[in-house]
Image: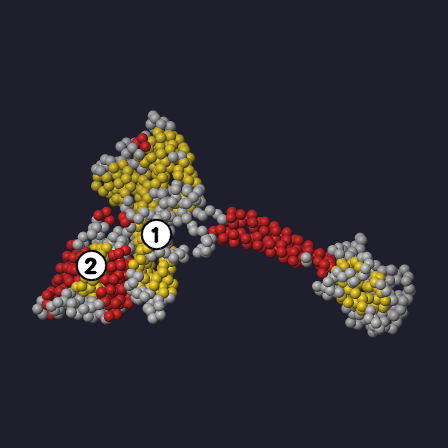
Amino acid sequence: MQWTNKGGALLLAGALLVLSGPFAATTASGAPGGAGAPALPRTPAAPADPGEGPDPVDFAVVVDQSASLSDKDLARETEAAALLSQGEISERSRAAVIGFGSSEKPGQSPVREVCPLTVADAAGRERLSDCVQELGRRDAARMGPGTDFPAAIRQAVSRLTAGGTGAAGKPAPKVVFLLTDGKLDVKDSPEYGTDPESRQSNGEKRLTEELARARAAGVQIWPLGFGSEIDRAALTAMAEGGYRGACSEIPGSVPHMRVVGTSAEIDKALQETFAAARCARIEHGTVGKPPADLTVTIPPIATDGSLTVAKHDPKVQVTYFDPAGRKVPVRGEFDGSSFEVSGQNGPVEALRVKNPLPGAWRVHIEAPEGHRDREVAVRAIWQGRLRSTVVLDPASPRAGEQVKVEVRMQTRRGVVITDPHQLAGLTVAADLSGEGFSPVSFRLADDGKAPDARAGDVRFTGTLTVPAGATGALEIVTRMEAPGITSDRRPLRTRKAEEAPLVTAALSIESAAVHPGGTVHGTLDVTNNDAAPRTLRLALGDQTPGAELAVTPATVTAPPNGSTRVPFTVTLGKGTPYGELGGQVTVVDPSDGGRVLRGAFLNVRVEAPPTWWERWWKAVVGGAVVVLLAGAFVGVRLAARRRRRDLTGVTLELCQDGRALDSLTVRRGQSPGGAFAFVVDEPYGAPPTLRRVPGGGSSAAHVLRRTGAGELLLRPRGGAQVPVRTGEPAGLGDHELVVRGGRPAPVRGRATSPWDRRPRRTRRTGGPGGRGGGGGTRPEPGSGLGPDAGYGADAGYGSDAGFRSDAGFGHDAGFGSGSGAGSGFGSASGSGGASAAGGQDAAPGATDYDGNF
């Protein structure tokens, strides 16, 4: 095999070894979305407890159906109303849809309740999807063309105050969303008076009365107007005349009016208004005509949400894919999330999701021919209902003692929130209540100011002093408020310490990044001032579901009248999900009624175990570099050896009786392995010629070979190998063979390295002459094969004129050879006689080979 093949194979092997690491790592870890890629551990779903979901809300969508609206405007109002009823995120909420106009003659009613107050569970949302379509069917015989705001608000308030409870048995918030394109118009409604002027005046008075009734009943009014005929002052009065309460203290959550330019904008505006009213957030996705893939992003902090798809056409079919690229069911449980679709047969469809996977959701839309002309829009309305984990220091404070309160947030899955950007605008407060004192409220902050340790670590800290009148049990409830974020308001219960405790404890837990199945180290310092030993218990609380944490040792004995330090470890289960680990370690004194002595958060990030490549890449790369260097070294050696053995440029000259009969030059690639095979053809009646024999190893051919050391060997056909020197004749049957050009064979005692060779002599072409060298220019006395006689290497057959060799029979004397006049064997001064330099003057056109070293 030639060196190029060997060297190339070695280099390729080294490159593959280097690349196999990343490729193996990719295969091991799994490409995102790739087939067969192992899924990362996911936190299991939380129990399906309705109380864990978002707080319910009772709302009515009141839609203007007056004659001023075009059919297209009315259709857009209908779709907007459907978006609200289908996109509601709580299955405990209730919704009603009411159309209104006026009553101007017998048989007419100013309102039309197309959907009675309906619970927005799976079945209820389907009923709402069907009944809301009745808004698009106006009946002039049953409803007049005017705009009777007082009747519409009265109907909505009456329905919403018919009952219903929210979280913890409290009444659910009540909200009216009113859509209109105009202003109060009851001038043709007899119930408001006998003439148009008095009717309008009485209508305004009646509206004020109905708004006062709404305020008293705790019903918010959120007006949304569109078009150019809107009475902005009247809409503002409606928003401010109703109940001014809000779902939170966040700016924008208090009822206010909004106006958009056309009915084409009301679906987006109404959903944004709805999100503000129920302390949710909305994410606007992409828009496209079927067939298409639309996307919308749900953030990590979301715990409940709905993906709404404004299809416009019931023929549009929708398929949902989660951020991992997996098709999700329209109903049921899947990978820790629960799904429930509604409105598939209507112009608006929605997928309600509990515990959604955060990221970009893909919504694929298809439609048959003839139903692809309308743009479809996807949006996500969501809310993050966070759990608060609270640590008190001291855990059981005394009356009058200052307490440090530290709060950390986590989702229903137990995922700890660590990105402060997700909690932008969040305010955190806490309420302390108990026996013997009035409730106390205080703020907590994450601003890096004492007592908060570090700003932006999403640990909210504050202090309060336990009232001096506290006599027993204490309860702390945290409140979180931000756009789209609410808290579960779980209480932390403790009790007041009667006196200075005999046993105190301090906990420290290392901050670490570990893999599932790993351990975290901590230290417990206990001081026991009691005369008897105390057995304390280490407990774990607020664990991330699926973490399977275990603390060792579970119990610690504190010796009497002394202090002790005990190291402990927290071990993570193999199935612990990746990310920030929720939970805390507490020290409990069972002999003191289970009093908590101290608690500390786990500050642990769970990471995926390193892949084979991540563990061994340094060794692999180092080994690959060694292999590549070794391969390069071997390649260089092989290349040098091949160059030494290569016969390219060597000329074989067939001679007889001192005359050159024919010559053959070895070309590139004709001497594989350093061997060149040839034969002497002797055609009848013609001079003999040299001919190359391809293959290099025929037994019927002569073979010239160069060894790795540079020595030339000639193996005549059927004979044994004999050494050959450049420029010296060697027997070849009835002829002689002279090898010219290339590199000479090494001589004992002479340097053979390329850098030790003598520089090439500069040759000049000689004067006129026949074939071969003639006309020497520097005659010397001397003749024949005298002491300095030899074969002149620079004379001869058009190349390297002459048979000059410094290692010839003589020294610095030549034998002029050629077919021109004056060729002879004798005195160097004769015509064609060799010069002292061995016939340096060659015939014109002679080729100069760098072979005379």
Q: Is residue 279 visible?
A: no
Residue at 77%, 64% (x, y): give it: 678
Between residue 817 and residue 616, name the one nearer to us: 616
Residue at 30%, 66% (x, y): give it: 313
Between residue 829 and residue 285, name the one nearer to us: 285
Residue neighbourhood size for the residue with mark 1, other residues' Cα within 10 Å, grouped as few (<14), some (14–19), many (≥20): some
Residue at 32%, 60% (x, y): give it: 379
Residue 397 placed where, x, y %? 29, 36
Q: What residue type is labelled 2?
A: Pro
Residues at discs 2 and 1 in contact (Cβ within 8 Å): no
Q: In the figure, 461 relative to 36: above or below?
A: above
Between residue 162 and residue 268, name the one nearer to us: 162
Identify the image quadrant of residue 217. bottom left
Q: Mark 2 points at which residue?
A: 116
Q: Name the residue under label 1.
A: 333
Classify the position of the C terminus by image quarter. bottom right
Residue 265 placed where, x, y %? 28, 66
